[in-house]
């Protein structure tokens, strides 16, 4: 999910999920599993792999094309250690249950554009983590800045709270009036008021996708 959680292009949360993707323009979309450690596997429930994941030959996890009777679940990923991850019909993780029944559950609130505006994560002991968009007013012609920094302009904020205590604040610059622009994560502020700033830039390179001949060269 490039901008699934509103953090910016290329950023996500460290939980497993299922997403649709296309290899090329006009190609039929496929589904793939993205595990919590960032690994990506194309899903094929009709293949020969034990795991139902293309080219994954190990038998330490298996993805099922059903929710295992867990409320709201459409898929489930079962690990050999007894932990099961459940996913809803959109591919978002809805619960993590270990072999002893300890459960972490996820509840999502969606914005009008279909992205996630709020996540509530609750564990077996009742602890609540909230990751939510903070709505505020601003002038599009003069964006607010962080400590007056020229690269600190933002127009979106997300907060991370544990049991209603603020842990971190995320500052994002999101596109205005264009679909081609991407969200950019500008900075993260911790509970002590310390910041980490991020800079991003786009580069274009020339390349030749054909193999070189014996006497030729190629661009990389």
Image (cartoon, grey):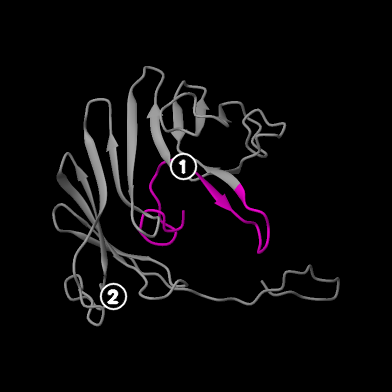
Residue 9, horizontal then vertical, whole percent:
43, 62
Residue at disc 2, secondary structure = loop
Instruction: Mark 2: give few (<14), some (14-19) or many (20+) Cα within 10 Å.
Output: few
Q: Residue at point 77% right, 69% down?
A: 210
Q: Determine which residue is flagged by label 2.
A: 151
Do the numbered discs 1 and 2 sit on residues whose CB atoms are within 8 Å?
Answer: no
Which label sits on residue 90? none
Residue at disc 1, secondary structure = loop
- Residue 156 drawn above or below residue 168: below
Is residue 4 within the magenta segment?
Answer: yes
Residues under labels 1 and 2: Cα distance?
30 Å
Q: Residue at point 66% right, 39% down?
A: 54
Q: Residue at point 39% right, 30% down?
A: 96
Is residue 153 within the magenta segment?
Answer: no
Q: Which residues make up the magenta segment?
A: 1-30
Quarter that holds the C terminus: bottom right
Q: From this viewpoint, which residue is outermost toward the bottom?
A: 141
Taking the image as shown, residue 48 lies to the left or right of residue 88, namely right
- Residue 194 drawn above or below residue 58: below
Q: Earlier in the sequence, mark 1 or mark 2?
A: 1
Taking the image as shown, residue 149 lies to the left or right of residue 1, namely left
Q: From this viewpoint, which residue is outermost toward the right?
A: 214
Taking the image as shown, residue 36 lies to the left or right of residue 22, namely left
Residue 16, horizontal then vertical, whole percent:
45, 40
Residue 11, horizontal then vertical, whole percent:
40, 56
Q: Determine which residue is flagged by label 1.
A: 37
Residue 40 makes an appearance in the image? no
- Residue 138 drawn above or below residue 45: below
């Amino acid at each position: 999910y490039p901008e699934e959680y509103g953090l910016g292009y290329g950023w996500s949360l460290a939980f497993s999920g299922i997403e649709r993707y296309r290899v090329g323009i006009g190609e039929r979309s496929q589904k793939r599993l993205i595990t919590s450690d960032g690994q990506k596997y194309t899903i094929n429930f009709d293949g020969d792999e034990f795991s139902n994941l293309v080219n994954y030959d190990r038998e330490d996890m298996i993805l099922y094309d059903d929710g295992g009777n867990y409320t709201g679940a459409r898929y489930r990923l079962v690990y050999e250690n007894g932990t099961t991850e459940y996913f809803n019909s959109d591919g978002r993780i809805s619960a993590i249950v270990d072999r002893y029944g300890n459960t972490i559950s996820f509840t999502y609130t969606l914005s009008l554009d279909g992205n996630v505006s709020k996540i509530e994560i609750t564990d077996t002991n009742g602890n609540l983590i909230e990751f939510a968009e903070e709505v505020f007013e601003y002038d599009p012609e003069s964006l607010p800045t962080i400590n007056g920094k020229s690269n600190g302009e933002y127009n979106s904020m997300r907060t991370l709270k544990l049991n209603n205590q603020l842990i971190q604040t995320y500052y994002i610059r999101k596109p205005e009036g264009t679909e081609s622009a991407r969200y950019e994560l500008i900075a993260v502020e911790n509970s002590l008021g310390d910041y980490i700033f991020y800079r991003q830039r786009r580069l274009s390179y020339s390349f030749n996708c054909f193999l070189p001949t014996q006497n030729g060269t190629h661009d990389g």
